[in-house]
Amino acid sequence: MKTAVFPGSFDPFTLGHESIVRKALPLFDRIIVAIGANSMKSGTFDLEKRTQWIKETFADCPSVDVVQFQGLTVDFCQKNEAQFILRGLRNPNDYQYESSIAQMNQAMNSEVTSVFLICDPEYAAISSTIVREVFKNGGNVSQFLPKAIQLDA
């Protein structure tokens, strides 16, 4: 079974994230959206709420699982028998950053391959960081988020 892990903090999960997962559905038998939990850092949005939002977003996709994890992504992949790490790229800066991480992951576990998908142009400007800032400053972010995620400023 071809299994991919799509790791991230997803604080919040955006339309760009959703698009990457949906593009990847025909490529993999199973996709695990793995929400990284960092005990040293609290997110803007509660970890349980992020998990719920992403599960609701993919309620129509039985091959998508949503879980929380701590530690190294390659270790999580090994524990879950995932051969691939799925990452989305918005721009050349994302490529530079992600390719360095992919090379480190490859060095730590040569059995896990990173797969990059290019985001759709309409999502290239959307990042969780920018969405958080807009939200924190009272702006309406609904146009950047899946329908399952309803935020009140």
Image (cartoon, rainbow, N blue to C red):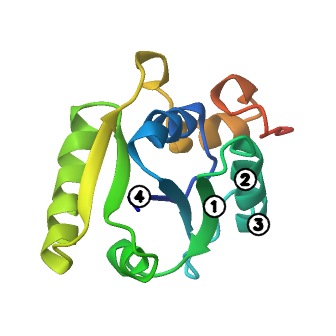
Residue at horizontal 31%, vertical 65%? Answer: 83
For residue 48, the mark is 3
User: Going by the image, does 94 lie left or right of 137?
Assistant: left
For residue 148, the mark is none
Q: Residue furthest right?
A: 152
Q: Amino acid at mark 2?
A: Lys
User: Going by the image, does 74 lie left or right of 54?
Assistant: left
Earlier-in-chain disc, 2 versus 3: 3
Give the image quarter of residue 61. Answer: top right
Q: Amino acid at mark 4?
A: Ala
**Label 2 close to label 1 by CB (< 8 Å):** yes
Residue that carries the numbered disc 1 in the rendered image: 66
Q: Nearer the viewer, mark 2 or mark 4?
A: 4
Q: Amino acid at mark 3?
A: Glu
Q: 54 or 94, which lies in front? A: 54
Would you say residue 45 is visible in this rendering? no
Q: Residue furthest top?
A: 122
How crowded pointer 2 is (Cα within 10 Å; few <14, some 14-19, many 20+) is rated as some
**In the rendered image of this protein, does residue 69 appear above or below residue 66?**
below
**Label 4 close to label 1 by CB (< 8 Å):** no
Q: Secondary structure at mark 3?
A: helix
Would you say residue 132 is visible in this rendering? yes
Q: Nearer the viewer, mark 3 or mark 4?
A: 4
Residue that carries the numbered disc 4 in the rendered image: 4
